[in-house]
Amino acid sequence: MPKFGRRDVSSKMVPLDGLGIIPERDAGKPPILDIRHLCVDFGGLRAVDDFTLLIGRTEIAGLIGPNGAGKTTVFNLLTNVYKPTQGRILLNGQDTRGKSMHELNRLGIARTFQNIRLFASMTVEDNVKVGMSHGYTDGVFTDMFRLPGWWRTERRQHVRALELLDLFNLTDKADTLAGNLPYGDQRRLEIVRALASEPKLLLLDEPAAGMNPSETHELMDNIRMLRDRFDIAIMLIEHDMNLVMGICEGIAVLNYGRIIAKGTPKEIQSNPVVIEAYLGEEAAK
Amino acid sequence: MDKTMRGYRQIPVWLKYLINALLLCTLLVLGNHIIASGGVNRAQKAVILQIGIYILLAVSLNVATGYLGQLPLGHAGFMAVGAYAAALLWKALPKETWAVILGLLLGGLVAALFGLVIGIPALRLKGDYLAIITLGFGEIIRVLIINLPGITGGTPGLMSIPKHSTFLVVYITVILSCALIHTLMKSRHGRAILAIRENEIAAEASGVNTTFYKVLAFAVSAFFAGVAGALYAGYTGILTPGNFTFMTSINILVMVVLGGLGSMAGSIIAAAILTYLPLALQSFNKYRMVIYAVLLIAVMIFKPSGLLGRYDFSLSRILEKAINGRLFKKPGKAGEDHA
């Protein structure tokens, strides 16, 4: 794995509009994600309540919390799988309300899933190519009749897919069916597919789930490398605290659908409310 | 298996196309020569033409069923629309080659239009619901044909349609149609359609406009069913609503499932076998349909994924293996137990 010039990960976090903190290096630009007072009700249950969060252009942000806290629900709200009951989301300054999932993808949001959702009986390379869903203009007839547009697109997508797969050492598995990959590679392939749409914000839902410590460590390097190389913001849900504390710059802690703490890893680790949520009242004392 | 492996020689794409095109042309000329020289009797010729028509029907249904992963049950409806459209045009035009082509295209286009009209509302539904709505559509078409005798000839049928479906017309159309479906599926649009079958949410989240591609696949499926319908009209010379019942749709679906959902070669082989079988079994008269049914059940028990599963025959892949000297080696099994 080639090493890329590392940004100062411990870049100071500065407050923005009194609503949250973003890395100092992103302070001049508007945040990539601006979520205000987001709520969603499922029947009588408020699954996410008054969720307000800012994420900087090149920030690695973490969303943590006990099981059932509503973390994945937040991701589903960000990608319009669910419609928020209240509140609004600005992605790159644009309101995401009423947009379909694929339109949001075009606006620059890509995600992976907690339970892997690959195109299992397609090859690894084709999985990545499906991710390259925009920026190509060859129409249906161009492709059916093999006009020059098809040859151009195929060549471009092939080269690009191998480039992206190379980042995660998956190049030699390009022709394998995605469903036949070992578990860790499937998780990596999901990230590659998400990257293929050239997102500005990458949402990773438990990327380290089921990985062993050395794989998790490699994943941490990879996530940093992605941010540095593609200049994107990454928001991740994760239970592995080594990973979260190791690479996230801003962390939000969710419990029962509410944010109970926001801050840098250091602040979160010493926050009594967080410790109470995770370990119970006794431990917090 | 692993084409990225170093030293594995590949045949360039254009050469693959050239090889396939030459081979198919040779087969066409050969077949035409045999038929023209009286090598087959009339009954055999009829079977050959029917096989071609059913191949196109199965391959076109495979687009919606095997590739897109939906279950439409109204394929005979699209076939009927195409058949009547082409028949009416052919009756009005002189018997020229351009009229034949025009009729085939019109059959396809009218069917595709119906596909769009049905597909846009129907594809909001999934699974059983889509099956029922398309089943209803197929029946509506049939009832409409019965009740519009002024245009369609009603129950007695539409007579004296020019018999345009010669061996060459049928097989050139079938080969071209299969080629176009193949090239569509091997493009970014085809991959988007497959992705929807594999995981709709992931496809949508990856930026695939699932509504557009579902309707596209449905319309393409309807288009080629319409073309097949046109071929059918030119083959029988008479169209009656009884040709396009629910059972016709089911027969086509059986071919697709038996051949293997998502395998074009499977659809072709199954269509050929299942069209030929009832005719071949005619000497067993009484037990004909029993044997037919038992064979179907046997295949589904012993090979539930269909004759070919999702495998697609590729001549160039075999040639590639041959020039690399690994024709008889099994592809690598690495990682398969992780599925």
Image (spheres, coloured by chain):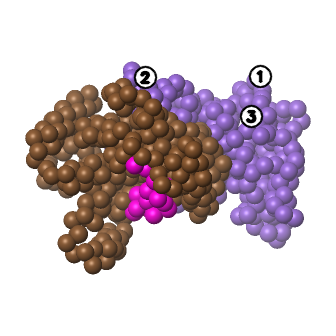
Chain colours: A purple, B brown
Check if mark 2 and mark 3 are on a common chain. yes
Q: Earlier in the sequence, mark 2 or mark 1?
A: 1
Q: Can residue B104 be spotted in the picture?
A: yes
The residues colored magenta run B238-254
Q: Which residue is mark 3?
A: A91
Q: Can residue B312 be spotted in the picture?
A: no
Pair 2/1: label in front: 2
Q: Which residue is mark 1?
A: A28
Amino acid, disc 2: Gly
Real-space Cα distance between discs 2 and 1?
40 Å
In the displayed structure image, the side of residue B47 where residue A173 appears, left or right: right
Callout 1 secondary element: loop
Relative to residue A134, is residue B63 depicted above or below? below
Task: Write down the chain letter for disc 2.
Answer: A
Residue B35, located in which quarter of the rendered image? top left
Q: Do the numbered discs 2 and 3 sit on residues whose CB atoms are within 8 Å? A: no
Task: Write down the chain letter for disc 1.
Answer: A
**Callout 3: few (<14), some (14-19), or many (20+) C-alpha neighbours within 10 Å?**
many
